[in-house]
Image (tube, rainbow, N blue to C red):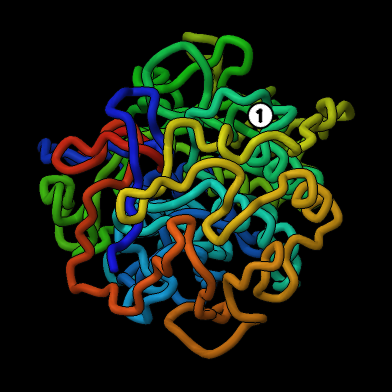
Amino acid sequence: MSKPTVAYAHDEGSRLWHADAWSNAAGTGLTATDLGAAYSSQVGGGDGTGVGIALIDTGVVNVPGLPASQIVNGPDLSFESQSTNLRYLDTFGHGTHLAGIIVGNDPTTGFRGIAPKAKVTSIKVGASGGAVDVSQVIAGIDWVVQHRNDDKASPIRIITLAYGTDSTQPTFYDPLNYAVENAWRNGIVVVAAGGNTGTVATLTNPANDPSVLSVGSASVNNTVTNADDSASTFNSRGTSRNLDLLAPGEQIVSLRDPGSYLDQTYPGARVGDKLFRGSGSSQAAAVASGGIALLLQKRPTLTPDQVKALLKNSATALAGGVGELNLAAAVKAATPTTVQAAGTAAGVGSLESARGSNHVVHDNQQLVGEFDIFGGFNPAVWAQATRNLSAWNGGVWMNRRMAGDGWTGTSWASKTWASAAWSGESWADEAWYDDTWSGHYWSGGTWSGHYWSGHYWSSSTWSAKRWK
């Protein structure tokens, strides 16, 4: 039985996890510790206490610097969820890097993220080889919305989504756009990485949705003062819908995931034994999420519309028209009295169009059409359930058993959502999950984005651009 993979086009516009670039170039970089100290000072002291952040990504691993008390394992919705050796774990190295930027805290080395006392809920949707379908991401967003208040002390106020497709479907119809708009309506700031094509055309989906906060990368000096900063040249830019905000995103040093695909493929990106260096809109999205956690700690009554308006209005102007995150100005600014226009997506369009050019594959059979990973998908039925907050019932999403029915057991994380065995046939009329998936080194051929797949990693899904 073969593991699902992801098919991709070898061009700069094909990207799902908007790839961070990982290279073996020498250099140091700007650590999350530098950023955390600067931003905490800007808000008059803060650590993100009381703010929950959902990281819909490739999972996280138990590495020094990710305290169990600040990590929750939400459901693993990835293809690797069927392996006890891989469940919840970040076999690629992407999610761990972003989690470190947000909540890292290692007293032995002094490494700290931007909001080390925020609570990150990791919803794993991506596997090591890049295999992920847009339906899994949509299911993850739905789960976050319905479970945002499970932790009364740290309700989920932010979604960090370094994911995007090259879909050109109008946002009104697109199911992924509808999912993020539903999260926004329910009080969650959706921070969406804008992409890294380096071209002016369109942002990736769902950053292209005008309701969410689209974030791109800024090249910053090491004082984190915004002086002499500039927009990163690899940022995607839209003609009708552009980036809302820039945040530091070049050569950001965060936590290393030993043995992961990126760690093996780009050893030159290691900084010592515990850290790793990377750049892209993924990193920028994580930085912005950590900053928003500090802002919400200080001003907990802010709505998503108010957060977005504050950050855009207070941003430091840079060349190109998009400003850079300035928490010192945002935390002091008056609460906006106007709100943005309500999201207009209906979600009744095509799931296939939401995928763009990116498709998961099993035994040379692509998942195409109006099917999720288990079978037929009706966007109109799903959209109604999502709006009614009934898409999930326990561990069942849209009548598909994807996880267990509640919080259970113990792990290195503070708590973990139960797992479940998947049943049924795949789109290729055979069971595609495999309980034997394992390995000490989780090498994968393709994760995705502008540059990752094999030695040149160009493929399909996560966001960022360079690991240097």
Please tell me how crowded label 1 is: few (under 14), some (14-19), or many (20+) other residues with Cα within 10 Å: many
> How many labels were placed on the picture?
1
- The answer to whether residue 115 is visible is yes
Q: Amino acid at mark 1?
A: Asp
**Horizontal relation, residue 412 to residue 405: left or right:** left
Q: Position of residue 405 (x, y in %)?
A: 66, 81
In what quadrant of the picture does the C terminus appear?
Answer: top left
**Horizontal relation, residue 18 to residue 146: left or right:** left
In what quadrant of the picture does the N terminus appear?
Answer: bottom left
- Classify residue 225 by image quadrant: top left
- Residue visible at 47% across and 62% down? 426
Q: Position of residue 410 (x, y in %)?
A: 50, 89
Q: Position of residue 419 (x, y in %)?
A: 53, 79
Q: Position of residue 262 (x, y in %)?
A: 22, 52
Q: Which residue is mark 1?
A: 209
- Residue visible at 69% across and 45% down? 179
Going by the picture, which residue comes out furthest to the bottom?
A: 409
- The answer to whether residue 186 is visible is no
**Horizontal relation, residue 157 to residue 101: left or right:** right
Residue 95 vs residue 112, the one in the foreground: 95
